[in-house]
Amino acid sequence: MPKKNKIIKQIFFDLDGTLLDTAPQFHLALSNVIEKRHQEKVGFDEVRNLVSDGVSALVSLAFKISENDKNFENLRTELLNEYSKFYLESSLFKGVSELLNSLRKKNIVWGVVTNKPRYLAHEIFKILKWPELTKILICPQDVSGNRKPDPSTLLKAIALGGGSAEESIYVGDNWRDSEAAINAKMDFLFADYGYGNESTIKKDNLKGIIQEPLEVLEFLN
């Protein structure tokens, strides 16, 4: 059983691969861009494994180029534009709605800290009616463009929640999430049902590994 040696007052979540299953929409968008440019198809599993690494990683996967390539930024923008046609079709992972309702009943503050652009994350929040449940949505644009593993987004969320890092947990599925939590001096839960690989997660602040969203509740007092 998880150790409950701390009083947890607030919990923050990554978005893609932790609360929201966005891999199908990213695969569709990338496939469309690839088809337009007559490139070789990329399998769903390959895309799923990289979704939490961001759009840039998907561009590199599909077109075999680095971020220094002169065409990289145009391809990244094209993929984001294509993804914006489908992103509101993504589904929550099973158990997420129940988890968030349980947190509300327990009076535990929660929010989302993501590397996703704010204009996309904000629309997702509205569709899911999450502004009725939390005011905390932190994106890179809220902290001068700093992205995880930089801790700025997490530190802002902690401050908005009114608690301390010691009273907080971050839940994510990627090494960037883990290292951002380390840098923010807070505990981390690895979402093994998401897109990341446990072997890339540092153990420094690892509170536990969950196989489904509702298991988060086992780590709360």
Image (spheres, helix red, strand yellow):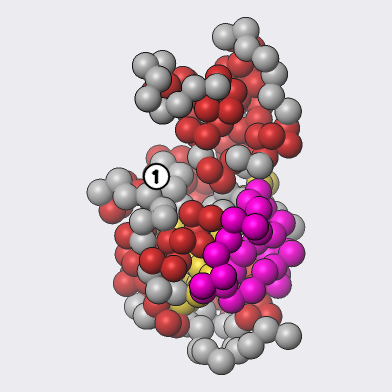
Horizontal side of 63 relative to 119 (left or right) equals: right
Horizontal side of 143 relative to 49 (left or right) equals: left
What residue do we see at 45% from left, 44% from top? 116
Horizontal side of 220 relative to 167 (left or right) equals: right
Q: Quadrant of residue 26?
A: top right
What residue do we see at 66% from left, 59% from top? 198
What residue do we see at 40% from left, 74% from top? 185
What amino acid type should be assigned to the residue bearing mark 1?
Arg
Residue 191 visible in the current orientation: yes
Q: Secondary structure at mark 1?
A: helix
Residue 108 is situated, as x and y percent measured from the top left of the image, at 51, 79
Residue 209 is situated, as x and y percent measured from the top left of the image, at 67, 69
Residue 12 is situated, as x and y percent measured from the top left of the image, at 49, 66
Look at the picture and state if 116 lies above or below 191: above
Report which residue position mark 1 lands on: 118
Residue 172 is situated, as x and y percent measured from the top left of the image, at 56, 60
Residue ranking furthest to the left: 144
Q: Residues within 10 Å of mark 1 (few under 14, many from 20)?
A: some
Quadrant for the N terminus in the image: bottom right
Look at the picture and state if 200 lies above or below 117: below
Report the magenta residues as a range: 189-215
Q: Quadrant of residue 137?
A: bottom left
Q: Is residue 91 rendered magenta in the image?
A: no
Look at the picture and state if 44 lies above or below 189: above
Question: Depth check: 221 or 179 in front?
Answer: 179
